[in-house]
Amino acid sequence: MTTFPKRSLMAAMLILFVAVGVNAQDRYENASAYSALGSGFPVDYRSSQGSAMGISGVAISNRLSGNISNPALWSNTYFTLANGGISFTSYDAKDDFGSATNSNIGINHFQLQLPIYRDKMGVSIALFPVTESRFSALNVYSDDPSTPGADTLQYQSFFRGEGGLNRLEAGFGYELHENLSFGYAASLVFGVQRSATDVGFITSGYSPVSFDTRTSSIGFGNRFGLYSQFLTPFTSEDALALGLSISLPVNLSSSRESISVIGNQQIVLEDGSDNDGEIRLPLEVTGGVAYYFNRYLLVSGEVQYQNWSDYKNFSGQNEEFLTDRLKLGAGFEYSAFRHTETNLFTRFGYRAGFSYDSGHISLNDTQIQTMLVSAGLTIPSPASGSSVDINFDYGIRGTTSHELVRERIFAIRMSFNLSERMFFQRRLQ
């Protein structure tokens, strides 16, 4: 009998899952079918402002809204800022075997941004996801034995998983020069991923079998940022800004537990106390440019690179289905609420953008690409600098060719931006 390396066998199982991943059960929350691979699907750090423009916002500085995409932007902190959000995402998946619609509701992030020296130095504390894994697939099999007169063996398997990695981060931004700021953030990256398979036999006489694996990971990360701005470079009203964010690779100390249940008998396959590994997350570099035509109109573009080919799994090996990722995005913002005249149109801010993502997964010689159209609306508070952002995403990921899954993505994100003058000494005249 031919034997296969453990890594190749695992990759083959994952590719098989993606090929049939659209047959999902509604009773289990789902994200992308591709989140079953590696450490889950990467989640980009996007500000509520940049999210509706198809970008993260590394070159967009805003006094009234927090931003986790670039630590250098915290140097411009003037008010005490707090922001967080929730999202609803729907995935309409289709392949050669069928189709299914899955959806989930989640918390995007939370950030508190404080001024130390107004417009000179600020600090940030934030919690946000790094990767997301949430999937399920139900498959029914029928095995016809070649022996004449033998019974047909019928069984079904339910493959599911959840979890991902999160980042608890604290850092500062400092203005080195009137045109240049620097930022640094240290973080604790942690998370738990769980996958399970239940096999039940429709044919009588066979005991059900289940496998459950839980992987816990923790490590330390580092991010650096640069931000540069130039006022009135071409006209008396315009401004130009450049932003750069670099997230260094993260080595995660991991432990894995795995159990199997056959009938009523539980068998420990891997004990987390003596089964340690190390997962390596890749380098990420994001650069952007923002141009302000005036106080109302802004356009911005970004390039993001992640070298997922350097990712290492629990066993310390590279995954053959992971490849380097390149993401391009561009969008605009029109702040109509800054006009002095008051009508329904001038009460809001408007944003829209587009992004192309080459993807970090390659299956069957096909890269899993994503194209996304974004739009959003800002509703500012008439009494303070606080606001609510409502953003929409619509896109397509993957393809139905080469026995893969194509997903149509629709998302609604609501972010709350609180801006207050706190911790300032009041003076009596």
Image (cartoon, rainbow, N blue to C red):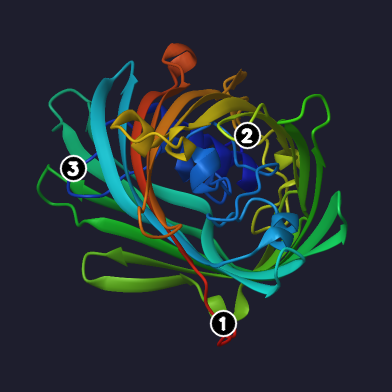
The residue type indicated by label 2 comes to His
Q: Nearer the viewer, residue 421 or 194?
A: 421
Q: Please identify the quarter of the rendering in which residue 275 is found.
A: bottom right
| Sequence-wise first label, 1 or 3 | 3
At mark 2, the secondary structure is loop
Question: Residue 325 at x, y = what percent?
Answer: 68, 33
The answer, for residue 146, to whether it is visible in the render is no
The residue type indicated by label 3 comes to Asp
State left or right for residue 114 relative to residue 290: left
Question: Residue 85 at x, y = what percent?
Answer: 39, 55
For the point 44% across and 21% down, the residue is 404
At mark 1, the secondary structure is loop
Q: Please identify the quarter of the rendering in which residue 154 is found.
A: top left
For the point 42% across and 24% down, the residue is 395
| Sequence-wise first label, 2 or 3 | 3
The residue type indicated by label 1 comes to Phe
The answer, for residue 1, to whether it is visible in the render is yes
Question: In the figure, 113 relative to 51: above or below?
Answer: below
For the point 63% across and 34% down, the residue is 360
State left or right for residue 23 relative to residue 415: left
Q: Which of the image's four quarters has the C terminus?
A: bottom right
For mark 3, what is the residue?
Answer: 26
Distance from the alpha carbon under mark 1 to that under mark 2: 44 Å
Distance from the alpha carbon under mark 2 to that under mark 3: 27 Å
For mark 2, what is the residue?
Answer: 360
Q: Which mark is residue 423?
A: 1
Neighbor class of circle 3 (other Cα within 10 Å; few <14, some 14-19, many 20+) is few
